[in-house]
Amino acid sequence: MLMTRIYNLYKRISKHEKSVFMGTFLITFFTHAFILLNHIPNHDGIMFFYHDQDTIYSGRWFLKYAGALSSYFYLHYLNGFLSIVYISCTTVLVVRLLKIKHLCLGILMGALIGTYPSVACTFTYMYTADAYMLSMLLATIAVYCMVSGDWRKGALGSMALGFSMGIYQAYLSFALVLLCLWMLRLALLKIKTTLKTVVSILGYLALGGAVYVAGLLIRLQGRELSSYQGIAESTLLHAPIWYAEKICDSYKKTYLTILRDDIFDNSFIQGCVFVLCIVCLCMIVYRSAGLFMQREWGLMLRLWSGLLLIPIAAFGMSFLSEGVVYHKLMMQSLALIWAIPILLLDSETANKAVHVLAELAAIGIVLNVGSYVIGDNIIYFSNKVSYEKTYALSVRLVARMEEIENYETAEYVYIAGSMNYMDADLAGKTRYMLSRPGGDILTYYNLGYVRMINRYIGGHYEALTSAEKIDALTSSLAYQEMPVWPAQDSVRMIDNVIVAKLSEQ
């Protein structure tokens, strides 16, 4: 029976892994409790209040079905809860894959994955967050199956990778970085791998890409891909110098992200993270020296190959097209970089000097997690302020619109421009935030404000979206003579269109 199989599967999970799951779940839940317990939509959230997420034009052919698991409504608590479950399951598989034996280090790995700023940025898009976290879990399952040595599991892993990319292509980077860490871990444990194993893994990755392309072609059915993130121009045929520049750029981005952008405005923690990187480098050099003395050339090569390939893997999507721009939602793979000190800590050694370095590394990791927790909540705080400012302005707009004589006869509403709500106290202190610090949350200004008014204030207005009619309206003398908000005549009726002029366009 199905329930019996589920129970037997549950019994196969060790106590160690169950503890890692619970530790990760609790840390992640309390870190992100603010966004789970408060409805704080961003610019896309206003638009996708209810949406099937069938964004096939951006290559995400499986997103529609992954999002259906929690319905197509913007359910912040349910979507967030499912996301945290997926994050916790991902951590358990990462701990099993990398053979992390110590419970505290396993939970610390989960804390890093669950509190990393990419998760907070993804949670600002809560309507699709659970689907994206499912994509991360599928990418992890893919790697776990690919390295199993069983071709049947490897093929299953290729399927999982294809579906993961079908939800969100960026989690290919998560899978690639995880493979690099697996290779590094085997070197630390002095477990040798054969060329056949490496070739088979490369084959599974290629098969996963083929599964993604096949699903994309089936779902497209004659429709064209958009130019978003260079998806329509993706190719592996570039000049060698182009690849060289991308490799250098990936190292630069990795360095700047983990040592500057990921950390909120705190010089002490930035210094501690820098020291942590130096400590890790010293520990890796020490391990390499040991392998060198033992003439384990192959293991030393695997250790450094895994290490040096991580930045390239983390920004792997950028090698497909010039149009790919990595924003914070796409950088979850960088959370795995902090598995390096965890793996070094988890590898036992009798050298006292290395023990001292290990203790310094542990302190650095804990401080780093603390920095992420604070930074995540700064994101939520700023988004809450932005939402409230946008809501308040929308209420004021409705009040002014209803003061217009015969406003109910208007055919359309056109809200021109936007408000400059930038908060100088927040600007520059939250570098990885997606919204403007303390500013309004909308980027689709006209349609976004009308949707905001209709869905959160109870209006029944139709936005003017015709480019031809908008050009005619904005070219009219009546519009050009209108003052900018909040002047008395900044909201008026022009040819059956209620016009609000927030700024000069």
Image (tube, helix red, strand yellow):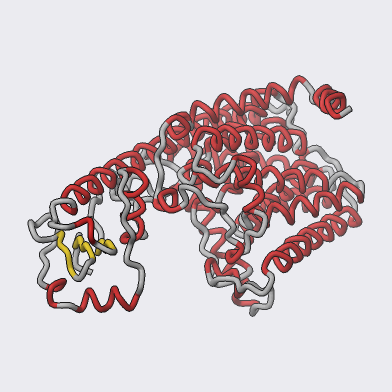
Nearer to the camera, 409 or 267: 409
Residue 449: quadrant of the picture: bottom left
Q: Residue furthest left?
A: 488
**In the shown orientation, is residue 380 left or right of residue 77?**
left
**In the shown orientation, is residue 11 left or right of residue 137?**
right
What residue sits 76% from the left and 50% below the top?
160
Q: Vertical placement of 176 versus 382: above or below?
A: below
Nearer to the camera, 321 or 315: 321
Residue 288 at what x, y percent from top left?
73, 45
Residue 406 at what x, y percent from top left?
16, 58
Residue 465: quadrant of the picture: bottom left
So how many labels did they put on this image?
0
What residue sits 78% from the left and 64% below the top?
210
What residue sits 65% from the left and 78% below the top?
238
Taking the image as drawn, is residue 304 in sight? no
Nearer to the camera, 373 or 453: 453
Nearer to the camera, 504 or 331: 504
Residue 464 at what x, y percent from top left?
32, 66
Residue 222 at what x, y percent from top left?
67, 74
User: Considering the image in quadrants, where does the N terminus appear?
Assistant: top right
Taking the image as drawn, is residue 113 in sight? yes
**In the shown orientation, is residue 1 left or right of residue 348?**
right
User: Considering the image in quadrants, where does the C terminus appear?
Assistant: bottom left
Residue 12: quadrant of the picture: top right
What residue sits 59% from the left and 57% below the top?
54
